[in-house]
Amino acid sequence: MPTLATSPTDWPLHWIVLLPLLGAAINLLVGRKLARRTVHLIACGSVLAALLLSLSAVVGSLYPLWKASQTGGAAPELRDLFYTWIQSGSLRVEMAFLLDPLSAVMILTITFVGFLIHVYSTGYMAHDPRPAAYFGYLNLFTAAMLLLVLGDSLPVMFIGWEGVGLCSYLLIGFWFDKEKYANAGRKAFIVNRIGDFGFLLGILLLYANVGAVDYAGLEASLAQLVGANSPLLTSYAGTGLSLTFFAGLFLFVGACGKSAQIPLYVWLPDAMAGPTPVSALIHAATMVTAGVYMVARLGFLFLTTPEVMMIIAAVGATTAIVAAVIGFAQTDIKKVLAYSTVSQLGFMFAAVGCGAFTAGVFHLFTHAFFKAGLFLAAGSVMHAMGDRTEIMGMGGLRKKIPITHATFFIYCLAIAGVVPFAGFFSKDEILLGAYVAQLPYWPEWFGRAIWAVLAVTALFTAFYMWRLYFLVFAGESRADEATQRQIHESPATMTGPLVVLAIGAVLLGFLGLPHIGGLPNAFAAWLSGTFGAWQGTVLPEAHASTGTTITLMAIALASALIGIGAAWALYRNGPGALVQRLVVVLAPLHRWVANKFYVDELYDLLIIRPFRLLAKLLFAVVDRVFIDTLFVNGTGWVTRTFGRLARRAQNGDVQRYFVAMLLGVVGIVSFATCGKPRFEATTAGGTAMRFVADVGAGPGANGAKVEWDFTGDGKIDATGADVTWSFPAPGSHAVTLRVEDGLFREVKQLKRVITVAAVVLEAAAAPAEGAVN
Amino acid sequence: MSNVLWQLSTSHFLALSAVLFTIGVAGALFRRNALIVLMSIELMLNAGNIAILTFARLHHDQSGHGLAMMVIAVAAAEAAVGLAIVVAVFRATRHVNVDRLTALKH
């Protein structure tokens, strides 16, 4: 077990990530040879170890620091510099981990809910033929998610970000032998790639302009820019918008992809193709909240750009209400929960967009429990119903699977926001945060508009969740005889986690009590260790008057009760006559909603089809013509053809080979004896000189053309190997000899300066040769 | 007699060497009997020897004689191996016609 290092803020946090990674490595590499029980033990054990380690770090080491910080100590942070990952020029990225109150909430949620879901999976996947792969992926996901939240810099977060995306893809398409499931996995991966591209652009933009990628460095550099009133923040690259606007926008695109916000939410409902525990862990409790975590983590950056905050809040609120409306008309139990997740994520984004980071993270925290519980309960229902997911064919399960029913009932109360369940407190805090939100440059009405949308969404949430509850559990069973006979409660490995999560859904809300009459909000106090430095300037929820708080709470509670009441009226005995009539009357609207506003079809028309057309074109031209025909087959054809030609020469006749050899020898000898041009100059009386050119002794010498230029003007003054030339005056003269080979017509040239003596007695220039190439 | 010898110049020896070499080349190229081809090769080697000795004498350099002895030794070895191959080929094919010995190909 790790021990405390030299500094009190040092803690070997990397083990929290490495333990699940180790479990994944064992299960993925040798898991196929292990017994099912061993695989379960490794998977659950590694996550349990990570949970215990996290608890030890948070309770044992971080809590005392937090305590000290409340009375004026340094910010509560545990750090772990594992190793230097990249060092290149000015770029230095550490594989460093940071545990502060925010990541503490995250790792406890991830390891605790993750552990429960691992345990649940041992029951749910008891008959699957590939347990090692499943649990290996699940462990790998846990490790990647922990890396995402523990990483102390954007690149490290990005590894986790990509890692969870990969595991999500692998687990959605876990039953890849069904093409529909495999396609759902691909869709999730591709849509996530779009978001990840934006995320990466954001990181690179920050690195290029700020020069830091770790959180502390980023925060310091940004503060410096703000302090210096840098032009980067007033008009980046002449756009009139801040650098942080673009960086924030790109990062938010990444968050949209990972956290299923408009317009990139389309993958999440399809992701329900994966095993149900996967939906609970990855597509409800943890991975999809990564975007919210990222925005909260980089709150110091987003707060410098109210425009992006406005976009985040608007996108969140829009997503919340649109997904809730789509949830009305879904008839697949997992699809309802999927749209509910999208909608609840919208709530969280609306919260962080309004600067209510605590509220957003609090909802993330409580939502992880009741939504994971809802999915696990749905898995239990499917288990009972023989893997059917169609809620119109359920009903009356209340008595038959009592534990699942009881927990589902609690989760529904929690998500609907009924006092005193967890969802009530967290959702109420978001509504309050939105209502009083007032960021710089925001229009005054904006926060209230967000609040109004969210309040209506809260009503819708209560309605569709309780519609689901009544259709599944209330009234008479609408299933066929055979199915009804085999309905049974799930094993203890499945119901156990349900009960634990239900306890969480009941109690966790009390961590974040509203600001009425000095009630303690433990959660906000805890997170002030992270947000305290910059949140106080914008977060107004603590400034709201008690009257406002109570009024908003009453409205939220009323909308929840209205939603539940409406669902009770319409669905308490299954889809009654009134529902049928409504569907007929509102047929066009119903069709529109049931088909999810035809968004998938729209994307298909606008993006996928043009893209596919382009791909087909590229395939026909680039692939078929250039790569296949020209490059691959062309290379083969050229080689074969030349080979066939060359083969003719090699006919086995030794004498023919001898001829070739002789020709080669003759060629080499002629080449070797082709002399380089040179000449000798001797006096010929007065300023006249005799020039004798040596053109070598090879076969090329025969018929060689010899030309002379004595005046240096480039024109030929004389031809022939032996010439005499009278210079007009003594002194230095440049003489150029040009020899054209008689055989190969190769031209060689030599330029030499000779001196003509004033009183000529003998050769002016030494007859030394001066060959040049 | 010595008179005649003294009238011979370097060029005469080189000419003889060239003639012998050319005869050797022609024989190696155009004769079909493997034995004759081998003999032609001997001829080329000896033509080379004459040229080497000529130049050795011209330059008063005794190392040329050593080289000539080496060539004779190599020629002897070559003749031994070559004739052995010819015998082996004859045993296998009952002929030594190089035009029909075309197994040495791709």
Image (cartoon, rainbow, N blue to C red):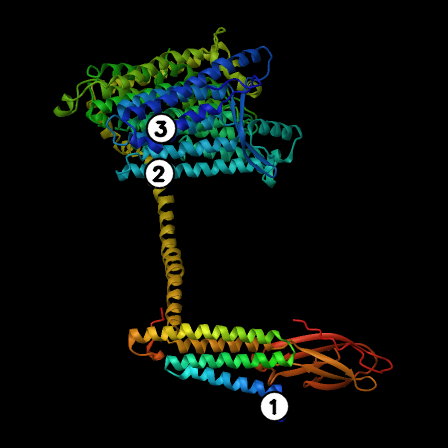
| Percent of width and height locating residue A122 | 29, 23
Residue A20 in the image, given as x and y percentages of width and height: 40, 26
Q: Label 2 is found on which chain of the structure?
A: A
Label 2, label 3: how far apart the Cα atoms are: 20 Å
- Choose top left, top right, bottom left or bottom right for residue A16: top left
Q: Which residue is farthest front?
A: B1
Q: Residue at x 53, y 30 (%)?
A: A83
Callout 1 secondary element: helix
Whole-percent x and y of residue A486?
16, 22
Q: Earlier in the sequence, mark 2 or mark 3?
A: 3
Residue A347, quarter of picture:
top left
Tell me where residue A673 appears, x and y as whole percent.
Answer: 60, 77
Relative side of A82 to B39, left or right: right
The amino acid type, in three-letter code, at marker 2 is: Lys
Q: Say if residue A217 shows up in the picture.
A: yes
Identity of the residue drawn at 38% across and 14% down: A422
Location of the C terminus of chain A by quadrant is bottom right
Numbered badge on residue A138: 3
